[in-house]
């Protein structure tokens, strides 16, 4: 892993430098300045929220714990890292720069964020920084044309980035295996969560997003981030949506399991899983993502019909909004340095936005797939009381087998989520490969 990163980092950096050169010319700037950022202080407190470094900073360097530090890039020059290593005996200070990337930077170590700012080059500067205490004295312009350009190109992952995303997937898959075993052993949601963290060897704050660990009907809450401390009397079903991080890159993985006595639910999981693999196979250059999302509605409506939940055709289920009651979120989103990565709607490197198809307000990706993009494919079917109540009041209600629907509420729902790379040929499924790796 380390050798692979060391081998692929130089060309990754060269790519970022080219992109920076181009956006600086377009924007008429001399320097690109990227702040790692500073931790946010809790109100009326002396404690900070967990620190999350600026994704632009993490794009250049595998440094996630470098508050106050800056990258300063001037075309034609070696990029500079102004690295803050405070004199502090209260906390563990960030380790001095080391590893495969240091030789590619001019590194200056300073003792405070204020000292770092003084060292930034003067001139016309494109600054990419969150507005936060400690950098008030500096223009935090985040020029939109620069962000648009850099975000657009962030959609195309370099081989170095893909290596890190494979690693994030392997860590996630390893932890998912442990979580499944904890479910089968009858643990509580809280217990499963702790098992997951232990197997990932990551703290909650290090994960790319808050894990969803849902037993039984809790699977119907799309963003269920509560953790029951006591196990239910019977764990019939388990939906876990949990990822992992690798040097600032995310994985985003969902699996759904049934207890052995819940054969009817397992059968539905198997159908969603088969459908999901069909959608993954369509992650190919030239495929419109919103069209894939609509296709998913038709296929999932077919699954609902096959399993006897609905009696109308798949077409009319999609048309009448029935499929949206069972599948009420988007098929997926771009992923990378952020779990919901940037530029999912972007029209070009100069900005602009591609609208969502009408009636699909939660889709997070409207672009056409191209090689280098990484997206999630995460179809689901849920039994959500609120949405089912709305459905019951509509004329289509007559074509729904409510007894069957009601019998499945106890299982909550199903989501299967993989992270998939669009290539010049067949897609690379980071998630399935990672599960296979952990056999
Ligand atoms: N875990 C967040 C998502 O699936 O988008
Ligand atoms: Mn997810
Ligand atoms: Mn996702």
Image: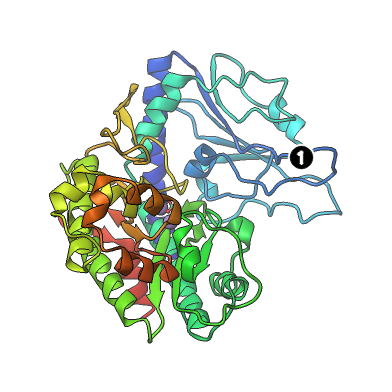
The residue wearing badge 1 is 41
Q: Nearer the viewer, residue 53 or 342?
A: 342
Does any portion of residue 290 appear in the rendered image? yes
The answer to whether 250 is drawn above or below residue 123 in the figure is below
Quadrant of the frame with the C terminus:
bottom left
Residue 244 image point, x, y percent: 50, 61
Disc 1, SS: loop
In the displayed structure image, the side of residue 350 where residue 88 appears, left or right: right
In the displayed structure image, the side of residue 385 where residue 320 appears, left or right: left
Residue 403 image point, x, y percent: 32, 68
In the displayed structure image, the side of residue 401 where residue 250 appears, left or right: right
Q: Nearer the viewer, residue 320 or 165?
A: 320
Residue at image position (67%, 20%) is 138
Quarter occupied by residue 340: top left
Q: Nearer the viewer, residue 349 or 278?
A: 278
Residue 331 image point, x, y percent: 31, 50
Does any portion of residue 2 appear in the rendered image? no
Q: Residues within 10 Å of mark 1 (few under 14, many from 20)?
A: some
Q: What scheme was used to colour the molecule?
A: rainbow
Residue 64 image point, x, y percent: 59, 50
Residue at image position (50%, 18%) is 30
Residue at image position (53%, 23%) is 142
The answer to whether 51 is drawn above or below residue 165 in the figure is above
In the displayed structure image, the side of residue 354 where residue 150 appears, left or right: right
Quadrant of the frame with the N terminus:
bottom left
């Amino acid at each position: 892993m380390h050798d692979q990163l060391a081998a692929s980092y130089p060309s990754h950096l060269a790519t970022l430098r080219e992109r920076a050169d181009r956006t600086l010319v377009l924007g008429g700037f001399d320097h690109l300045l990227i702040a790692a950022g500073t931790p946010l202080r809790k109100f009326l407190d002396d404690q900070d929220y967990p620190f999350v470094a600026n994704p632009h900073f993490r794009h250049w360097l595998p440094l996630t714990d470098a508050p106050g530090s800056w990258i300063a890039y001037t075309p034609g020059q070696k990029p500079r890292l102004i690295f803050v290593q405070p004199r502090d005996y209260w906390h563990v200070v960030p380790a001095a720069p080391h590893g495969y990337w240091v030789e590619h930077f001019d590194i200056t170590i300073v003792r405070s964020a204020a000292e770092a700012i003084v060292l930034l080059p003067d001139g016309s500067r494109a600054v990419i920084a969150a507005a936060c205490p400690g950098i008030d004295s500096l223009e935090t312009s985040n020029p939109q044309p620069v962000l648009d350009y850099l975000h657009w190109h962030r959609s195309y992952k370099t081989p170095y980035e893909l290596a890190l995303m494979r690693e994030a997937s392997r860590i996630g898959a390893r932890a998912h295996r442990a979580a499944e075993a904890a479910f089968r052993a009858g643990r509580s949601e809280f217990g499963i969560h702790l098992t997951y963290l232990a197997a990932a060897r990551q703290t909650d704050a290090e994960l790319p997003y808050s894990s969803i660990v849902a037993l039984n009907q809790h699977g119907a809450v799309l963003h269920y981030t509560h953790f029951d401390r006591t196990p239910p009397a019977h764990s019939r079903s388990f939906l876990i949506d949990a990822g992992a991080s690798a040097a600032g890159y995310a994985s985003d993985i969902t699996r759904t399991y049934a207890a052995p006595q819940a054969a009817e639910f397992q059968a539905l999981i198997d159908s969603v899983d088969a459908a999901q693999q069909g959608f993954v196979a369509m992650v190919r250059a030239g495929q419109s993502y919103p069209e894939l999302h609509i296709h998913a509605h038709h296929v999932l409506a077919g699954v609902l019909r096959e399993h006897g939940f609905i009696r109308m055709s798949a077409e009319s289920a999609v048309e009448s909004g029935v499929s949206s009651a069972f599948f009420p979120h988007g098929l997926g989103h771009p992923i990378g340095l952020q779990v919901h990565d940037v530029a999912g709607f972007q029209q070009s490197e100069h900005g602009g936005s591609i609208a969502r198809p009408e009636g699909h307000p939660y889709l997070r990706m409207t672009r056409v797939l191209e090689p280098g993009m990484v997206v999630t494919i995460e179809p689901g079917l849920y039994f959500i009381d609120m949405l089912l109540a709305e459905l019951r009041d509509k004329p289509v209600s007559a074509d729904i087998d409510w007894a069957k629907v009601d019998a499945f509420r106890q299982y909550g729902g199903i989501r299967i989520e993989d992270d998939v790379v669009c290539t010049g040929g067949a897609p690379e499924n980071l998630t399935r490969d990672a599960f296979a790796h952990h056999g």
